[in-house]
Amino acid sequence: MNTQEEKMTNQTNDRKTGVTFKPITELQTEHMLDLLEKGNLPFIPDKKGFCDTRAVRNALTGYEFTGINQILAKAYLHEKGLDGHDILTFDQANKCGAGIEKNAKAFSLSFQDMSKRDENGKAKVVINHYFADSHVKRPEKLPWLETVPQSTKDSIEPRSSDPTKYLGCYLLSMHYGISFTPPAALAAEFSQKFKEALQASPSNLFKIGRDAQRWMKEDLAQTAERVERAERAERAAPTHSASPSFSR
């Protein structure tokens, strides 16, 4: 099954098996903490100081995931050594004729379905299960997605170890397709703050993801405004006719 409703995210106990099902927020937070402890996350510099900034897309539609779902998808692929791969659901793979390999394992991302509301008017949560595009049986059936070039000349260096701003910078790096180069000491400070936030409450993982996405959008808007002001100023600047007294 590719989607599950919000009831599957609540803490429940199966009376027949006695198995307790944890909320998806708790499961994903525990996994993030485990990867954080191992230093095996794409936004934590490796021994060479490298962070992977290739954004994860839907292999069928080309949609680029955002916020916490981009971060979670990157973390999963990075853990499996699949950086640079895209993802799709079981149904999507079958619909295009690509199929999914028998023993392939999926990971989950959750989305708010604004068209479905509970009795309190809150949007219901839908959980989709994704596979890496390298797990399909017939990759030739997948649509060709243009490879986004990665620039090594430009980079973004975060100036704050605050989890929201740090991860906002990371999302910005993926948006622009450029390097993410946090200093080792700052990355260590971020790791500690991120760990403390996740240990305090599983919901903090998703709050940080939402805030990081919002921070990135605000930075993009501010950058666009600065560029527009500079272009207006350039157009308004007086022009000079060539003359012996005017030197360039």
Image: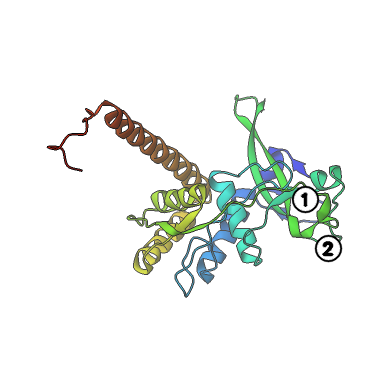
Secondary element at tag 2:
loop
Give the quarter of the image for residue 233: top left
Q: Comparing marks 1 and 2, which lies closer to the viewer?
A: 2
Q: Position of residue 152 (x, y in %)?
A: 47, 61
Horizontally, is 70 left or right of 3 in the view? left
Q: Quadrant where the C terminus lies?
A: top left
Query: Which residue is at 80% across, 44% downward?
Result: 92
Above or below, 14 against 196 in this view is: above
Q: Can I make out residue 188 in this image?
A: yes
How busy is the neighbourhood of tag 1: few (under 14 within 10 Å), some, or many (20 plus)? few
- Using the numbered discs, state the Cα–Cα distance from disc 1 to disc 2 in whole angstroms: 26 Å
Q: Position of residue 38 (x, y in %)?
A: 53, 71
Farthest residue toward the left? 245
Q: Earlier in the sequence, mark 1 or mark 2?
A: 1
Three-letter residue code for mark 2: Asn
Mark 1 sits on what residue?
14
Q: Position of residue 165 (x, y in %)?
A: 39, 49
Query: Which residue is at 61% across, 44% downward?
Result: 64
What is the count of numbered marks?
2
Residue 103 got which mark?
2
Secondary element at tag 1:
loop
Query: Which residue is at 47% across, 64% downward?
Result: 44
Q: Position of residue 196 (x, y in %)?
A: 43, 59
Give 128 or 4, whichever is nearer the viewer. Answer: 128
